[in-house]
Image: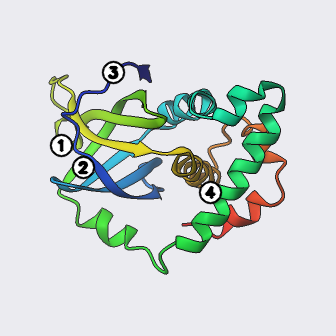
Amino acid sequence: MTTSHVDTDYPITKKIEIGFDEEADRLVFVTETVNHGIQTMVLTRRLLIVLLKNFEKLILKVSKAIEASPQHKNEILEMESISAAERMQQVMPESSNFIENYSRSINLYLITEIKTQIKEKIIILAFSGREVSDLVSNSHSKIAISALRLDRQDAYNLFSMISKKADDAGWNISPSPAWLEKNDRVRPLLQTMN
């Protein structure tokens, strides 16, 4: 994962669904982009670990409350994650078309790089990679696949969804941050998310 400026050349994501492909042992992000339709990205365990380890650093940079009271960082992160999970619970769609979107996806990419940027308190995650059909070739060209623009609550929700899918996959990734692991109010909410 590289922290750098993100070009505007990335298709902007307006919706994301996260699943797990058991056969390929990969997390799968099915994104609906503004101008490029459905893009499907597969994420390796190795790159996911890097993303999860950098999540807290990103959220700390966009939190005014933590900036004002750094000594209460874990309590603030815990309260914000509860708020985000409760909000997500209220706005979650009734059903997911993940399997349908994944199976009919024409554009399938392996994520090889995630760039991050913070712009006006918005976290931007930009995914680059290669078309899965090109993996056997010697081509090493990266394609700008998709970018997510996340406010703090969206970032917490994405982190929670990714963490849940990694748990469901049995990847045994090192413990989640204390504010997520010990939180009895967030864990049950995460169990109900897709």
- In terms of sequence position, does the residue under pointer 2 or pointer 1 come before the other? 2
Q: Residue beneath label 2, please?
A: 108
Q: Is residue 93 above or below residue 88?
A: below
SS at circle 2: strand
Query: How many other residues sit within 10 Å of disc 1, few (<14), some (14-19) or many (≥20)?
Result: few
SS at circle 4: helix
Tell me which residue sits at (17%, 36%) in the image: 134
Amino acid under disc 1: Ser
Q: Are marks 2 and 1 in contact (CB under 8 Å)?
A: yes
Q: Which mark is drawn over residue 89?
A: none
- In terms of sequence position, does the residue under pointer 1 or pointer 4 come before the other? 1
- In terms of sequence position, does the residue under pointer 3 or pointer 2 come before the other? 3
Q: Is residue 171 above or below residue 4?
A: below
Tell me which residue sits at (48%, 56%) in the image: 22
Q: Residue beneath label 3, please?
A: 5
Q: CA distance from mark 4 to mark 2?
A: 22 Å
